[in-house]
Structure formats: structure tokens, C-alpha cells
Image: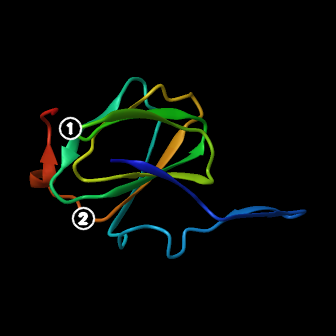
Amino acid sequence: MAYMIDVPTYKDERGVLSVLEKLLPFDIKRVYYIYGVKNQRGGHRHKKTIQALISLGGTCEVYVNDGVQEDVFLLDNPNKCLIVEAKDWHTMDKFSKDSTLLVFASEFYDKNDYIDERY
């Protein structure tokens, strides 16, 4: 099931620095970001791909269902990271106008890795 992790964050008079080093449970093979969303994104799960989601600005909600339990996660701070397992059917919605969602993926894009059916 998906879970949140805290991103080490350091703040001083120069600003804030958040570091993703030796933190993710996978090697990053793909990076993308989502913004300007009017409705909903996602609506699938994966065979192999694990993802890490971080809201760089604004907010959004991520609904997750792993076939046993379901939960909704609010992403509203760049020092919080949501790990979405391959088995997690997920959607992202309720994006604020200023929302930018950064996603790190464990696999390169492969259309055959996507499963569109819910549990």
C-alpha cells in the first residue's frame, strides 16, 4: 500500500533545501511533472513501476486502492513524498490552480506496464 515519507529538509536565512538522497526504494529511471490539470489524472496501476510523488507547489489529492485497503493522501508540501507501489490503483485529482506534481518512476515508460482495471 502507498505510504508517505518525510524528505530531509534544511532551512536557514538563505531559504529551504530538501534532499532526496538514498531515500527512494528504487533507482530513478524516469522523471515527469504534471501541472495545469483541469480534472483527474491516473486511473491505473502498474505491473512493475513504483512511483514517488511530490507536490512542488499547490495541492492535490491522491486516491489509492491496493485491492485490500484504500486511502486518500493530501500532497501539499514539498517535504512530503508519497510512494505508490505498482499494485496501487491510483488517481490524482483536486489539483489547485498553482499545483505542480513531480513524479519519479522506477521504470521507463512502457504502455504494457499499465493496468487500467480497478480491483
Q: Is residue 64 left or right of residue 24?
A: left
Question: What secondary structure is found at the residue carrying circle 2?
Answer: loop
Residue most extreme to the front: 68
Residue at the disc numbered 2: 108
User: Taking 77 as reference, is 16 above or below it?
Assistant: below
Q: Residue at x 43, y 31 (%)?
A: 37
Label whose residue precedes the other's in the sequence (1 or 2): 1
Q: Residue at x 36, y 27 (%)?
A: 40
Question: What secondary structure is found at the residue carrying circle 1?
Answer: loop
User: Taking 67 as reference, is 7 above or below it?
Assistant: below
Residue most extreme to the left: 112
Q: Is residue 102 left or right of residue 16?
A: left
Residue 43 drawn at (x, y percent): 25, 34
What amino acid does circle 1 point to? Gly
Residue at the disc numbered 1: 67
Q: Is residue 78 left or right of residue 113?
A: right
Residue 3 drawn at (x, y percent): 43, 49
What amino acid does circle 2 point to? Phe
Residue 115 drawn at (x, y percent): 13, 43
Give the label, 1 or 2, closer to the camera: 1
2 or 13, which lies in front? 2
Q: Residue at x 33, y 33 (%)?
A: 70
Q: Which mark is residue 5?
A: none
Residue 91, visible in the rendered structure: no
CA distance separating discs 1 and 2: 25 Å
